[in-house]
Image: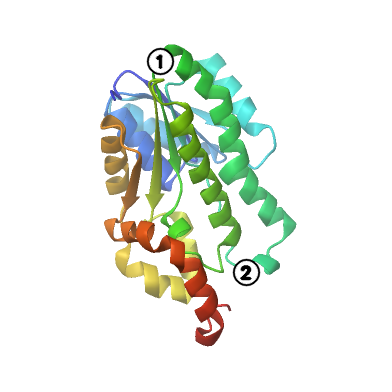
Amino acid sequence: MQISGRHALVTGASSGIGEALAVELAARGAKVTVAARRVEKLENVVEAIRKAGGEANAIRADLALPGSGLELARRVREDFGHVDMLVNNAGVSGGVSQFLEKSPTEIRECIEVNFAQPMALTHELMPGMVERGFGCLVSIATASVFFPTNLASVYIATKRALVSIDEVLRIELAGSGVHVLTVFPGPVDTPMLTKLMATDERAKAVLGPFKGTTDKLAKLTMRAIERERDSVVYPAQFGLGRWVSPIMGTLMARLSAPLGLNR
């Protein structure tokens, strides 16, 4: 699939994976619209892209708010034209705590940002892609869906929901010219991971040695778009999760109390 000359919308693009994806898309010739809550950081991303010779625009959007996905889709179309590539990257962790310790606000925000608003954006923008016979949906999930952990219950649940929608859309959109790509990042050097490692020593010990970079993930994602692959797992070691995932939940449930993993 050709990236050059296409218009891409990237959510959560003010830092981390979203920023890296926006920069890489622009470097390959796409016109990029970046969206996030932090306007100043968004403008920095736009400025960097333009200085490198790319084309970019910014829209402030708070996807924690109900209805924000529809509003963002409307504004992008009105201000910058139809969208050829939608990158649903925006995400929040929902707090580093067990499920019963999470507040209703944390749970609701996680559902809105990680699932409800990405679905709204997809539902609003994908019909145009189907009509034009060309398009790409990129969903940034997480390799954590393969490895259940007690400190990220709502985060994993919402990301699994995103993965499930992608699986169904591949069936529904077969032959339409619209490509669906699911990206499964493991530990990647982002503000979210930095915060997790600062608050959870187990996460730091387990994930730290495998930490990858956002630039490498962005390049792998571009390659997967161009070759129309269904998925990307990075770092590669976490691809093992696809095979062990069916037994991980049962195994962790049986070992959690004896090993103290449920605290």
The three-letter amino acid code for the residue at tag 2 is: Gln
Q: Position of residue 249 (x, y in %)?
A: 51, 67
**What's the CA distance linking mark 2 and mark 1?**
44 Å
237 in relation to 161, above or below: below
> Can I make out residue 42 in this image?
yes
Q: Mark 1 packing: few (<14 Cα in 10 Å), some, or many (20+)?
A: few
Q: Nearer the viewer, residue 82 or 239?
A: 239
Residue for point 65% across, 49% down: 109
Q: Quadrant of the C terminus?
A: bottom right
Name the image colouring. rainbow
Q: Mark 2 packing: few (<14 Cα in 10 Å), some, or many (20+)?
A: some
Instruction: Give the structural element (helix, strand or loop) at label 2.
Output: loop
The three-letter amino acid code for the residue at tag 1 is: Gly
Instruction: Give the structural element (helix, strand or loop) at label 1.
Output: loop
162 in relation to 121, above or below: below
> Can I make out residue 82 in this image?
no
Q: Which residue is mark 2?
A: 98
Q: Is residue 212 left or right of residue 80?
A: left
Residue for point 69% across, 50% down: 108
Q: Nearer the viewer, mark 2 or mark 1?
A: 1
Residue for point 40% across, 15% down: 133
Which mark is first along the chain, 1 or 2?
A: 2
73 in relation to 224, above or below: above
137 in relation to 154, above or below: above
Q: Nearer the viewer, residue 10 or 112?
A: 112
Extreme residue toward the bottom, this view = 258
Q: Which residue is mark 1?
A: 133
Q: Quadrant of residue 33?
A: top left
Q: Position of residue 56 (x, y in %)?
A: 40, 25
